[in-house]
Image (cartoon, helix red, strand yellow):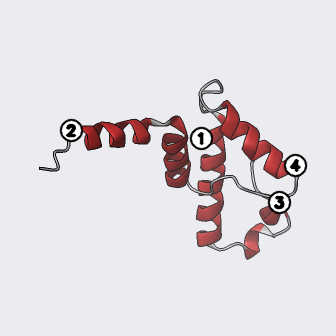
Amino acid sequence: MFIFVSEQMIKKRITATTENELAEEKEKIKAIFFILRADEKKYKDLLKDLKSSEYRGGDEYPTTTTTTFDLLVRKSGTLDKKYSQALERQSFW
């Protein structure tokens, strides 16, 4: 069995952890697994950027599944295509 926790949680005692902190930690782990399981071909540049920022000491990984989904949709270009199509169909006169 594996237990995944952030560096901050490793330093805390489980008895000193609040329910809110545990819920936030679970959400962070879900978000990380969500993005790491994304299509490597489609999100190659995004995953590369996230890893390189981590190597430089930054932490740009999303912390919730909602922000992860939002980031993946934005990087996929799907929103841009749909927005462009909607503008093309819109009549200004």
Question: x and y percent of residue 62 in the render?
Answer: 63, 54
Identity of the residue drawn at 71% across and 72% down: 17
Front position among marks 3 and 1: 1
Most extreme residue toward the front is: 93
Judging by the rendered image, the residue that carries numbered circle 3 is 7
Type of the residue with mark 2: Arg
Callout 2 crowding tier (Cα within 10 Å): few <14, some 14–19, many ≥20: few
Q: Is residue 44 above or below residue 4?
A: above
Identify the mark nearer the N-term, 4 or 2.
4
Type of the residue with mark 1: Phe
Identify the mark nearer the N-term, 1 or 4.
1
Type of the residue with mark 3: Glu
Identify the mark nearer the N-term, 3 or 2.
3
Q: Secondary structure at mark 2?
A: helix
Q: Circles 3 and 1: CB distance less than 8 Å?
A: no
Identify the mark nearer the N-term, 4 or 3.
3
**Label annotation for residue 55:** 4
Instruction: Give the spatial CA distance, label 4 vs label 2.
Output: 44 Å
In this view, the residue in front, 18 or 44, is 44
Judging by the rendered image, the residue that carries numbered circle 1 is 34
**Label annotation for residue 89:** 2
Front position among marks 4 and 3: 4
Instruction: Give the spatial CA distance, label 4 vs label 3.
Output: 15 Å
**Label annotation for residue 64:** none
Identify the mark nearer the N-term, 2 or 1.
1
Image-quadrant location for residue 72? top right
Left or right side of 38 for 13? right
Q: Secondary structure at mark 4?
A: helix
Q: Circles 1 and 4: CB distance less than 8 Å?
A: no
Instruction: Give the spatial CA distance, label 3 vs label 2.
Output: 50 Å
